[in-house]
Image (tube, rainbow, N blue to C red):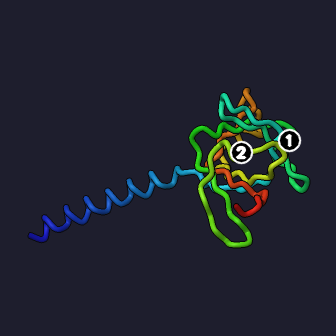
Amino acid sequence: MLHRNKRGIALCLLTLVLFLSGCGTLKNDTLLNVNAVITEVDTGKQTITVKDDADENTLGEGCLVDCSSIPMLYCDFATQKVTRITFEDLQVDDKVIVSIRSSEMESFRSGGNEENTLKVEQLQLYTQRPAE
C-alpha cells in the first residue's frame, strides 16, 4: 500500500513540475493605456488613424487602428455612467484611450508591423459629449 502511495505522490509531483515549467515560459504581457487623438475616420473599413496626444510620445503621427471587432466605451464624467458606443460615434479630433498589450506595442515600435496597424484590445472615447 505504501508503495502505491509513493507512485501517486511521484506522479503528482511530476505533473506539478511540468505544469510550473510550462507557466515559466509565459511573457509578462501587460495592458497599456495610451492617450491618442483621432486624425482620420474610414467608415468603409471601420478604421481610424490616431496620433499621440500632446503629452504622449508612443504612437507617432499616424497609426491605424481597426475598430471592427473591439469593444468601444464612453464614460460620462459628470454622471460616471459607462456606455458602449459604436464606430459611428467616433469623430476626427476626438481624444481616445486605447488599451494595447505590451507585446503588441513592442512589435509596433520595432517596425514588425509593415502596415503601421496597431491591434488594440479596447477603445474608450475620452472626449466628453453633451448630455442627450
- Asked if residue 65 is positioned above or below residue 55 in the image, the reply reads above
Q: Nearer the viewer, residue 53 or 95?
A: 95
Q: Nearer the viewer, residue 1 or 16?
A: 16
Residue 105 is tagged as 2
Q: Residue 23, percent across and down?
A: 47, 55
Q: Amino acid at mark 2?
A: Met
Q: Residue at x 80, y 41 (%)?
A: 50
The quadrant of the rendering that contains the C terminus is bottom right
Which quadrant holds residue 77? bottom right
Q: Secondary structure at mark 2?
A: helix
Which quadrant holds residue 65? top right
Residue 119 is tagged as none
Q: Nearer the viewer, residue 91 or 8?
A: 91
Q: Residue at x 69, y 35 (%)?
A: 47
Q: Residue 34, percent across and down?
A: 76, 53
- Asked if residue 15 is positioned above or below residue 91 in the image, the reply reads below
- Asked if residue 82 is positioned above or below residue 37 in the image, the reply reads below
Asked whether, in this view, residue 100 is left or right of residue 69, the answer is: right
Provide the residue designation for mark 1. 60
Q: Alpha carbon of mark 1 to alpha carbon of mark 2: how far? A: 12 Å
The quadrant of the rendering that contains the N terminus is bottom left
Which is in the foreground here, disc 1 or disc 2? Answer: 1
Which quadrant holds residue 35? bottom right
Mark 1 vs 2, N-terminal side: 1
Q: Nearer the viewer, residue 98 or 72?
A: 72
User: Number of numbered discs present?
Assistant: 2
In this view, the residue farthest toward the left is 1
Q: Residues within 10 Å of mark 1 (few under 14, many from 20)?
A: few
Q: Amino acid at mark 1?
A: Gly
